[in-house]
Structures are given as structure tokens and as C-alpha cells.
Amino acid sequence: MQTSSLKRNISNVYLSLLPFLTFGIALSLGHANYKTILPIGLLVVSFALLAVWILGAHAIVSSDKEKKHLVITSLMLIAPWILLCSLSGIGAPPFDKPVEYVATATEQQFRYTFLIFGGLAVAFGFALLKEKLKKSAENFYSWIGFIAIMIAAPLFVMNMSYYDQFLLETYKVRAASGSDKFPEWFSPVQGQFFVVMVVEVALTFLATAAFASSLKVAGWFSRTACNIYILISLLCFIDALLSIVFPMVGFVVIPALPFIMPYYIGINLMKRTGNEVAALLHPQAALAV
């Protein structure tokens, strides 16, 4: 039992550090070639999947439907960072270098395709979580979160498709023409999609704060954990809205950043499921899990 508890604690720590590990690899490697990206990405993802299984995903093979549903919900919220950590070696998008953006077109398309799948996974995860919370005494905050994420999801897909297709094709045209200038209509379109990104980022943070409030009322997580989720999400929500008027303060207006809080909620849900399974298998050691 002590060995099992140690493995789950190590898995919890690894998963908790995964977003920071992803940023660290991206900053240290910059833009690496695929011979470097693939081995590192596969290694990080393999450890992440193993950690998820040890932490609680193994409950999916049990006969308990409630636990299976909770595992699937958790996986949907965790999935975006499992996908994104595999791309940490490709570095930041070279928006200010159209020629380099075109030269790395395949990598950029992988980036935004993974982001689209990640955004949809979070939307599905929150939708499933709402159904689970409906059985508890709380139903108000989860509805607010559900409405917010259902509006944010199509905006997110639209915004990522802008970077995945529209911006790439525009850069290709500019690179082929040899001109240093963009068409006159490019700047207004770029500004429009910035507003779309701000709105979807703000709504995602609002949805996260609402679901954290719902989990707090339902008593699924500790009040301290929920208050941290709520505070960080609301501060990021305000920062995102301010960036419409003051773009320089929009520190959180980054496509992958709003997925961090749902990711940690997913980890805690997975841990909760694993704790329940461990308590059933080892009743006398339930307090030690």
C-alpha cells in the first residue's frame, strides 16, 4: 500500500509540474529540429500517460460506471497539456518572420491542430462535469460555466483556424510576391481576430471560475483549492478583458494558457477517483491515501 501511495504521489507531482516542464523545454530548446522534438516529446508524453494511469485512470477498467465517467471527464480536461507537451520543442510561433513561418508551416499546423483538439476536449470535459455536478446540490454555477465554455469553444476553433490556415496562406502570398508589405485589409482582419481571441480566453477563464465555484459548493474539492482556482481565473478574466483597451496588459491572452486551470481541475478529479478506488481496495489505509 505504501508503494502504491508513493507512486500516486510521484505521479501527482509530475503531472502538476508538466505545464512548467513544457514551458521550460520550449524556452531552453527554442526551435529544434524534429530529431530532437520527437524523442523528447514522446518521452514526456509517455511519462505523463503513465502518471495519469497510476493517479486514477486505471479506474476506467472497473465495473463502476460513475468512476468511469469521472475518469473520462478528467481525461478531457487533462488532454490539452498532454498534447501540447509533445510540441514543446518547436518554440514560439514566428509571427514577425513570415518567411520562417512559411518554412515551418507543417510545425505550425500541428501546433494549431493540437490546440483545436485541446480546446474541444476542454469543452467536452466541462460539459461532462456539468452532468456529474447536476447530481449534487449545486446546479447554478455549473450552468454559468457551461454557457461560457459553449460560447468560447467555437470562437476558439475559429481563432485557431485563423492561425492554422488564413495567416499561413497570407504569409505564403507575401513570401511568393517578395513584398515587404501586407495588403491594406490585413491589419483590420488581424485586429478583429485579436478581439475574438480575447473574448474566448476571457470566457474560458470565466467558465473555469464558475466550475470551481460549483465544485466548492458541491464539496468535491477543498475550499482552499477551489478559492485558488476561482481567484486566479477571475484575475485572468479581468486581465483578458482589459487587453481589449490596453493590449500591453493582456498577459494571459495566449491560446494555451486558459487550459492550465482546467488541467489542474482534471488532475484533482483524477486523484479523487484514484483515492476512492484505493479506499475501496484498502479500507484500513484510506486515510493514508
Image: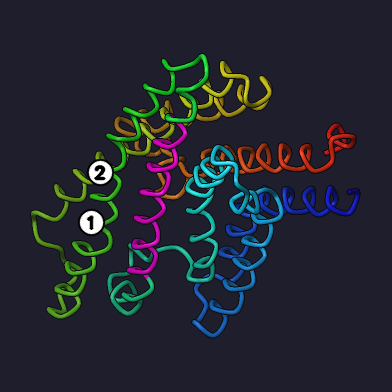
Q: Which mark is residue 162?
A: 1
The image shows residue 17, relative to residue 69, as above or below, that is below
Q: Which residue is mark 2?
A: 154
The amino acid beneath tag 2 is Pro
Badge 1 or badge 2: first in the primary sequence: 2
Q: Magenta includes 123?
A: yes
Quarter assignment of residue 143: top left
Give the residue furthest to the bottom: 35
Question: Residue 195 versus residue 17: which sits nearer the camera?
Answer: 17
Q: Magenta stretch: give its range.
A: 108-130
| Quarter of the picture holding the C terminus | top right
Image color mode: rainbow
The amino acid beneath tag 1 is Tyr
Helix, strand or loop at label 1? It is helix
Front tag of 1 and 2: 2
Q: Magenta includes 78?
A: no
Give the residue furthest to the left: 184
